[in-house]
Amino acid sequence: MYVSPIREPLIKGGKDYSQVTKDIMAPMAGKPSIYWYVGIAISGGALLFGAWATFVTVYYGIGSWGLNKTIGWAWDITNFVWWVGIGHAGTFISAILLLFRQKWRTSINRSAEAMTLIAIACAGFFPLIHMGRIVLGFFIFPYPNTRELWVNFNSPLLWDVFALTTYFLVSLIFWYVGLIPDIGTVRDKAKNKIRKAIYGFLSFGWTGSAKHWSRHETVSLILAGLAAPLVLSVHTIVSFDFATSVIPGWHTTIFPPYFVSGAVFSGFAMVLTLLIVTRKALNLEQYITKVHIESMTKIIILTGSIVGIAYITEFFMAWYSGVEYEQYAFMNRAFGPYAWAYWIMMTCNVITPQLFWFKKIRTNLVAVFIISIFVNIGMWFERFVIIVTSLHRDYLPSSWTMYTPTMAEVGLYVGTFGLFFTLFMVFIRVFPVIAIAEVKSVLKSSSDEKKHTHHE
Amino acid sequence: MNKYLTAYYLDEEDLLKGLKKIMSKGVEVSDVLTPFPVHGLDKVLGLRRSRLSVVAFAGGAIGATLGFLFQAWVFTRAYPINFGGKPYFAVPSFMPVTFELAVLFAAFSMVFAFLISNNLGPGSKNIIHDEQITDDRFLLVVKMDEENEERIKVVENILSDAGAQGITLKA
Amino acid sequence: MEKLTFKLTKKTITVFVVMIAIGLIALLYGVFGGPGPERVAANLLLNNYYFLSLGLIGLFFVTVHAISESAWHTSVGRIGEAMAAFIPVGGALILLFFVLGGLHAVFEWTHEDHLDAILLKKTPYLNEPFFYIRSVLFIGVWAVMAHYIRKVSLQVDHNGDIKYFNRLRTLSAVFIVFYALSSVVTSWDWLMSIDAHWFSTLYGWYVFSSMLASGVAMIIIVLYILKRMGYMEHVNVEHLHDLGKYLFGFSIFWAYLWYSQYMLIWYANIPEETVYFYERHKNFEGIFYVNLILGFLIPFFALMTRKSKRTFSVLIPVSVIVIIAHWVDLYLLIMPGAVGGEKSGIGLLEVGLTIGFIGLFLLVTFWTLTKAPLASKKHPLYKESLDYHTNY
């Protein structure tokens, strides 16, 4: 296939196939570096903090949190929505970019999808623990019972159960189907017997047959076709949790697409944060190049701008609607007691990503890293603003309250970070962080050295 | 007892050229093993387009139907609950779960069909002809009759004429 | 020899002129003997908005694919550019319509003596001077940008220098940012404010998704006509497949936004919001469902397979259906507020006027196509666009 000379190479260093295998598998081989141990120690500590907070919450009940009669949802749901949002980048990269034939996806899809799975696990933890009695969590599934009672299919919270379960399972098989050939590579390169046996089992007996590859491609495509609307549906349904209600600031029709856009926005920010570090630590700079980072920053501009337009639209409509409750909710957001949260959100989400219009900033890794953290913070505050500021001024001034998190809530949030980074670091050691076979399939058309020899 | 004659290339374009040559001489290549999906290989080998999409569609249709009917049954027959004065048969609220189940069933039925049709799965014991094929080798496999040693010679020659390397005979 | 220069035959021109004449006759019938001035005005607004939007979507397509460096689209890029030539024409027509009494005939808020407490609060935004400022500004910028983008695009073709391509990308980015804001605001101004009490934050994006689907359908139809005349040989089945996927995808996207808006309003059941759909359920029930069937169910099932996206015999009927579907969509957005359930209907006036606008739109589009080679051969991505396979 001809590739236009204006396209920048995606894989640098003039690799051949076997070099690709070696480079990508390098982080799995040998003993982990000292940084890895330090990282796992820190995230393990965070995880322990989270375990303590979980114990406190389960032992004392959610009275140990800062919630009160007016503010029934706060950090827990903020964190839930934030983590679900972060999970969206992985599927977006592997499904939607696949449908749009974006070749740069091949270097980042594996790790982004792993991130998705871990993020959904972190997200799912919050509603579960919010139920108070976590052992009764299975009540959310419709199962035949002696009371002949079913779950409420009219409730958006129940839709969430289905959406997240489906999203997790479909992402998992999508990820795993993509992993099978690469696990085959790990199996074939394994030196000792136990390792070979384990990866042999996990590789499902992959042979690399032409027929298998042909079906593998079809399956990947159709899974992408299914995952694309699925990824839209998940954050749409999360937004329904708020938008179906009649609470000013929550009930607004723009929520579904705006939440999806915000989710992809925060997801890409997290992918950038992680990969800028990972590519350096694992020596993968020739695979995850500045071109990849630049492409991701462009998606951040796009989704960030959509989010910005949605903010403005909401604000304008609150005025235009003439509904005084709606107007009050928005004025209170911008100038009320939580105004600081609102302006953090506005600055981080609307202003900072616009810096990516400048190529100098897009290609400066330190700047990209910093902005990506800003976006992560901004998107957390977005959910906080939506949830807490809409709730804390109830209809009756006598029920107006403020909200402060307790140590248990902080612990739960920090704990999910611990979980996230621990699992991510385990993933780095266990599976290839880049899709080896997929990178090989675009190597000829997208690597720098070979590029000029293969034009007709 | 069958034997396999294997030979490999180190570049997918050489493989495609060589393969065309070999097949034009009447050698039946039973399989080609590659480290990644090679464009145009399906055509050379004459593989049919996979019909896994039909499985996905059927799975999705079943998932959607079951999901919708179940919700409708729960709310109109099994345990009708009035919520917000809405009708019991509230189609808009049934849509999310219906959609999710459609996707879930479609994805899982297709992936299971994929694994079964390829004989892949946990503990599957497929023959691994060459451990290099998951790295950088494009291996072709020709099934041989053990008795017919002359034919083996002939095929070996055809393979080496077509530029294939590492021609080996395996049990 | 590949035919690169498009020539309009007399026969084609005649067909378009006859269509325009039908439209004019329908208009005269409407004004002088037909169903009343509100219906005429509402229909003029509908068609003006629809075809102006199709022109804008043409430009949107050109610009989006320029900044995303999509190779495949360079093969059909000229069609979008030609559709964009309708922007100044459509823009002028819609302004003319507002000035010549259309504004008063359709928009309740322009009658100052009718304003109730709620509408009075909206007067800082909904007042005639500001309305005209916004409309003129948006249409003006669109027309100017369309002109420059076209000019730079032709320069890309004349001169292979990468600097023209880069300039095209810069202009495209500017246009997209402007269009993202202006398309939302114009949908509020020109459509949503018909029901001046009602509001929905999703409205702008919903209308945009509707126009997006019908814009792709229009591109496919224009491509088909050109192919039938023996042009566009460089466009192969892979390009068609991509357009088919867009039609499929955007139809689903439209349905998604439709559902999101409808479900949220239905679920929360707040009177000042549900009144909008209540009216549409009560007086427009049949067409309400027809809209969903034409706009979602038919394209969804018809375009699901790979084969159907690669054959004109499926794509063309579906494209026509999609274009009708989004006409119906606009009908449902405009008529209940502007004309009301009792007086509105689909008769000679509606059909004739729409045919007239289609004639005008196609005349402008095809006339513009004669102005430049149908393939942009020096475009840096042109060669790449000829050599690719779509597996999916």
Image (cartoon, rainbow, N blue to C red):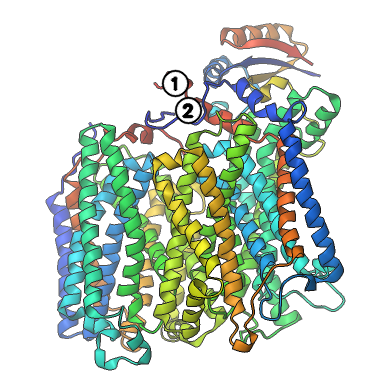
Image quarter in which the N terminus of chain C is found: top left
* Amino acid type, residue under disc 2 in the picture: Ser
Q: Which mark is residue A445?
A: 2
State left or right for residue A49 relative to residue B157.
right
Front in this rendered view, residue C54 or A20: A20
User: Please, what secondary structure does the residue beneath circle 1 have?
Assistant: loop
| Chain of the residue under the numbered disc 1 shown in the image | A
Percent across and percent down for residue A216 are 63, 38
**Residue C67 quadrant:** top left
User: Please, what secondary structure does the residue beneath circle 2 have?
Assistant: helix
- C-beta proximity under 8 Å, tags 2 and 1: yes
Q: Is residue A385 above or below residue A371?
A: below
State left or right for residue C218 relative to residue B133.
left
Q: Which mark is residue A59?
A: none
**Mark 2 vs 1, N-terminal side:** 2
Q: Is residue B70 above or below residue A36?
A: below
Residue to which mark 1 is pinned: A454
- At a point 67% along the width and 25% down the height, the residue shown is B134
Res. A101 in view: no
| Chain of the residue under the numbered disc 2 shown in the image | A
State left or right for residue A301 relative to residue A386.
left
Q: How many marks?
A: 2
Front in this rendered view, residue A364 or B107: A364
* Amino acid type, residue under disc 1 in the picture: His
Q: Is residue C244 above or below residue B73?
A: above
- At a point 47% along the width and 38% down the height, the residue shown is A364
Res. A397 in view: yes
- At a point 85% along the width and 73% down the height, the residue shown is A145
Density class for disc 1 (Cα within 10 Å; few <14, some 14-19, many ≥20) is few
Name, please, the residue furthest toward the left: C10
Percent across and percent down for residue C337 are 34, 83
Percent across and percent down for residue C288 are 44, 77
